[in-house]
Image (cartoon, grey):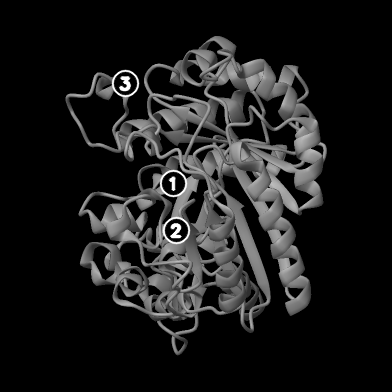
Amino acid sequence: MKVSKYNFFAHTSDGERIAFNGISCSLAKIDDDHFNEYKLIESGEENKSRLSDEKKRKIHQALLKGGFIYPADSLDEIEGISFGYNKSKYADGLLNLTIAPTMDCNFNCYYCYEKWKKQRDKTYMNRDTENGLIKFADLFLANKRKLSVSWYGGEPLLALDSIYRLSESFIKLCEKKKCGYDSDIITNGYHLKPEVVDNLIKYKVRSAQITIDGPKDIHDSRRYDIEKGESFETIMENIAYAKKFMNVIIRINVDKKNSHRVEEFLDYLVGSNLTENIGVYMGRVYDCKQDPLSKHHNLLYESKEFFQKRKEILSKAILEKKLGWIGPYPSPLVLPCGAVNINTFVIASDGYVYKCWEVIGEKEEAVFHVSKPEIINKKLLKWVNWDPKDNEECRECKFLPLCNGGCVVTAMKGKNRCSYWKDNLSDMLGILAYKHEHLVGKRNA
């Protein structure tokens, strides 16, 4: 037997030892017998075990099941990670499209990266581009089992007609090809009225990500409608209806100006009975222009600062407030993101096709246009051929299964893209163990 390179050990607040494996993402309490047997395997001294053969066999089975050990003659772990990476990169069963029917928006958030792209392109997708997109999907759906669409922008709900027409065409196309179809949307939520939700459900939009930046006063000072001003109450009313029919994920964009109010917003969700069918996560506000002279630059957390603040908020929410519906659980990332998958594309409103939504609108980064799609070309392969294991630091890192190199476009720019878990996993394991033992399944414990 061999021990996994990707094992982590920590303790709960009660002092119990827990073990976590980065490949299987198994999290388990581990008593002295299991831990001592593990240490003997690690040192190559299994023959020194004082346990009976039967107990030793059961312990080995448990450690194998969790991925904490593996047979000495099986595939090396890094080879297994490479196999999964390459298999998923060229997987041909799914066509995944992120579509921005417009980059226009009714909000003017200070941190919005899209508005810096030619001071926000207000182009809306026209019928010719829609028709070209349908033909593109028809071509790329050959022999695939499913089409998955994410609506994105800008604010996609400003282009509802395009969403409805394209959705109807996609559904008919999938019925003709006998493949599955599903959809989600990333929206500011302001126009997510009940009648819009009803239509989106009809067109198989199953989930919505909506950004709320804290309690009403904080949110309305940062995320307001350009024409009508305050947006918080309208969005929360829309969420209250939408969550009855679709999964709603609330993203909180965090900087130094609102981080101290996140707990208050979580309390608001509990007090308003808005936790059922709701997920919450925190995202870091960062400067897409990398301008240290920006008037907002001093509001932004550096990556490690943000991770620490996020951990503090999650710790209090789970251990003190007993909120079982918040807090990410680490999961293995076979691919860092869809940009490296051969069948994942981002479609701009003008029909240009990209591999990453961070570069949408930068035509030099477009891999082709929907009117002239190419299965393989040089620009496409720049993304598909990217491999985190080409970087020695990533290849040797214990956290590789949890990020697989992190954000690809950030890596291509030569910047640090290490994940949240690298600095916080050990501290978070005890918190997550408490959550899953005492709170999971209890919305307001």
The residue type indicated by label 1 comes to: Leu
Mark 2 vs 3, N-terminal side: 3
Q: Which structural element holds mark 1?
A: helix
Q: Which structural element holds mark 3?
A: helix
Callout 2 touching callout 3 (CB < 8 Å): no
Callout 1 touching callout 2 (CB < 8 Å): yes
Q: Dot 3, crowdedness within 10 Å: few (<14), some or many (≥20)? A: some
| Pair 1/2: label in front | 2
Give how far across and how far down residue 411 sits, in percent: 27, 56
* Side (left or right) of 380 relative to 15: left
Give how far across and how far down residue 123 sits, in percent: 46, 43
- How many angstroms separate mark 3 from mark 1 (CA)? 26 Å
- How many angstroms separate mark 2 from mark 3 (CA)? 29 Å
Closest to the observer, 80 or 299 = 299
The C terminus sits in image quarter? top right
In the picture of the structure, the residue carrying the numbered disc 1 is: 425
In the picture of the structure, the residue carrying the numbered disc 3 is: 299
> Residue 272 appears in which quarter of the rendering?
top right
The residue type indicated by label 3 comes to: Leu
| Pair 3/1: label in front | 3
In the picture of the structure, the residue carrying the numbered disc 2 is: 402
> Residue 365 appears in which quarter of the rendering?
bottom left
Closest to the observer, 103 or 128 = 128
Mark 1 vs 2, N-terminal side: 2
Give how far across and how far down residue 308 sits, in percent: 38, 32
Closest to the observer, 350 or 294 = 350
The residue type indicated by label 2 comes to: Leu
* Side (left or right) of 119 relative to 320: left
Give how far across and how far down residue 244 sits, in percent: 82, 37
